[in-house]
Structures are given as C-alpha cells and as structure tokens.
Image (spheres, helix red, strand yellow):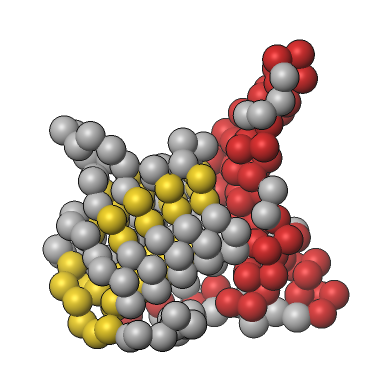
Amino acid sequence: MNLTADIKQSMRIQEKSGACGLISTLFSSVFWAVAVYRYGRMIQRLPAPLAIPAKIAYWTMFYLIQSLFGISIQLWGKIGEGFVIVRGGCIFIVAESIGRQFTVFPGVTVGNVRGSKRLPIIGDNVTLEPGVKVLGEVNIGNNVIVRANSLVLSDVPDNSVVIGNPVKITSTSSSVAYKPPIPKPAHLAPYCGPLNDLSETDLCKEN
C-alpha cells in the first residue's frame, strides 16, 4: 500500500520526528485521505465475494473525507510511494499516473478538460503549491515545482521550477535530489477561489 513510505515522506517534509511526530501524522486528516486512496487501490485486486464489503467501506470513507476535509483523490491512476498532502482543502486529483514523492498543497486540481483524450501524467519528485491547476493532456517531468496559483496546460520538462498563468520556466536544476522550500502547514490557508484573486504571499501568510 506504500503507506510506510508516505508516512516517512510526510514527516520529512513537515519536519516531524519521533513518536510525537508519528502520532500527529497518523491522526491528521490529510494522512487519512492518502490512506483511503491506498486502500481503494488495494481492494481493486480482491475477488468478487470480498470486494463488495470492501468497496462499501471504501466509498463510505471516500465521501466522508471529501465532505469533511475537501479532499478527493480518484482511483483512476496510480500514485507512487511518498505521496504527501501538506494540508487539506479544495484538493481534487485524477491523473493517468503520478510518480514517487508527489507533494500537494491546498487548492490543487489535477484533472481533465473538455475535449482532451487523456489525463495528466506526472513524474517523480513533483510539488504542486497552493492553488495550482494541472489540466488536460500534459506531461510534468521529474524534479519539478509548480509555484502557487499557476495554471499548467502544456508540458513541463524535468528539473524545472515554473510559475504563471500559463506557466513559464523560472529556473532549472540538474540535481535529482532537488528539494523545494516547503512552508510549514500552520502557515497555509485553504483557498478555493479563482486563480488570480490571491497572491502566493496571501496564501502562505501565518494564520
């Protein structure tokens, strides 16, 4: 189910450690959103007699997570290990496939647009900051940061930092271990409005 890798990555990004850090991670709503997604993917392989009650349990948890925390992670595509939601609120994700170490913030949408033939494909070590929209037949490479409130409608190459509506490359890095600057969750506020209403500063200021 990759949950162990998800937990470790979440603790690393949010600078948590020890028993207290583990407990706070396990009891967070965003962890349960990831756990329900992993569970839903796992039960797809169950035989029919076992699948029925398992799917009832899954859909019950899915709609609870969606209604209570504003997080909807569809089962369509596989998401690799190290999947982290930094904070919940207005998050919708459906993709062809997503690689390892995928990190998302509030207000992120990954999905389809009318007329496109497939969903987005996202590589390894990708971070989508608050308010990012990734839509249509796009490919996002490995080691990419998409800055807050950006709109991705075209391909993004490996080792890039992009921003804008539509996005433009602002910098590149050849390092596979490229690590984005991650604000602590307490500094973020969920936002569901139009892309241009708030700036990155507004989204990341302290509560």
Percent position of residue 2, x then y: 67, 54
Considering every residue shown, the one lying at the far top of the view is: 49
Percent position of residue 73, x then y: 50, 44
| Relative depth, front residue between 124 and 145 | 124
| Relative depth, front residue between 71 and 115 | 115
Left or right, 41 with reference to 174: right
Q: Which residue does the image show at 26% across and 69% down from the upper left? A: 157
Percent position of residue 6, x then y: 65, 62
Considering every residue shown, the one lying at the far right of the view is: 19
Q: Which residue does the image show at 63% across and 70% down from the upper left? A: 9
Q: How many marks?
A: 0
Left or right, 179 with reference to 32: left
Q: Picture quarter containing residue 166? A: bottom left
Q: In this view, does 72 lie above or below 107?
A: above
| Residue 29 visible | no
Q: Which residue does the image show at 52% across and 62% down from the upper left? A: 100
| Relative depth, front residue between 19 and 169 | 169
| Residue 63 visible | yes
Q: Picture quarter containing residue 82? A: bottom right
Percent position of residue 12, x then y: 64, 78
Q: In this view, does 186 lie above or below 112?
A: below
Q: Which residue does the image show at 20% across and 37% down from the upper left? A: 116
Left or right, 172 with reference to 183: left
